[in-house]
Amino acid sequence: MNISFQYKFLFLLLIPLLSYSQITNTIVKAKIEIEEIEGNIKITGTAENLSDIVQSLSYQLSVIKNNNVLGNQSNNTQEGFFTLNTSENKNLSTAQVNVRSGDEIIILLLFYNENKELIGKDRVVLGDEKKKMK
């Protein structure tokens, strides 16, 4: 067989796998809700079942706080398992973070199925100031 044909054939076989792995939030929708309370940010990770099947999943809610002025960084990750009935909405986890001038907060919510495949995600960045190029 011609080597270029083998590469083309392999590429065609991988396209469905690559496109399948990029699809998220079609079965269960991940959503991060933000509420400001007296100089603090209340973060709630929520899930919504978009399918007609009961879902049993795991989640990971990560909050990464950077302060470029002071050079501080803190990470907080909460994990757990949950089930969702058909068309059910559920609050999974809540975190509260104090906010100062110069803070950048990155919040990431990930959902995994029983096979540890990523099926839902949401990401929010607060205080994202463009870094100046020198």
Image (tube, rainbow, N blue to C red):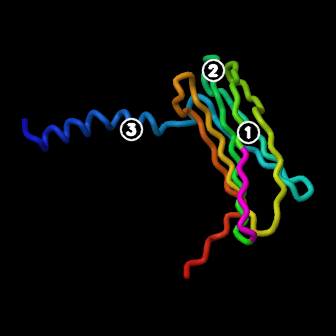
* Label 1 residue SS: strand
Residue located at (82% from left, 52% from top): 97
Disc number placed over residue 18 in the picture, else none: 3
Q: Can the viewer see residue 76 in this picture?
A: yes
**Quadrant position of the N terminus in the picture:** top left
Residue located at (71% from left, 58% from top): 73
Left-right relation of 23 to 63 = left
User: Does the magenta portion include 97?
Assistant: no
* Label 2 residue SS: strand
- Name above or below for residue 44 compared with residue 86: below
Rendering coords of residue 37 (x, y %): 90, 53
Rendering coords of residue 10 (x, y %): 23, 36
The amino acid marked with disc number 2 is: Gln
Q: Quadrant of residue 5?
A: top left
* Label 3 residue SS: helix
Q: On the image, numbered disc 1 is attached to which residue?
A: 45
**Magenta segment:** 70-76
- Nearest the viewer among 111 and 23 is 111
Rendering coords of residue 41 (x, y %): 82, 52
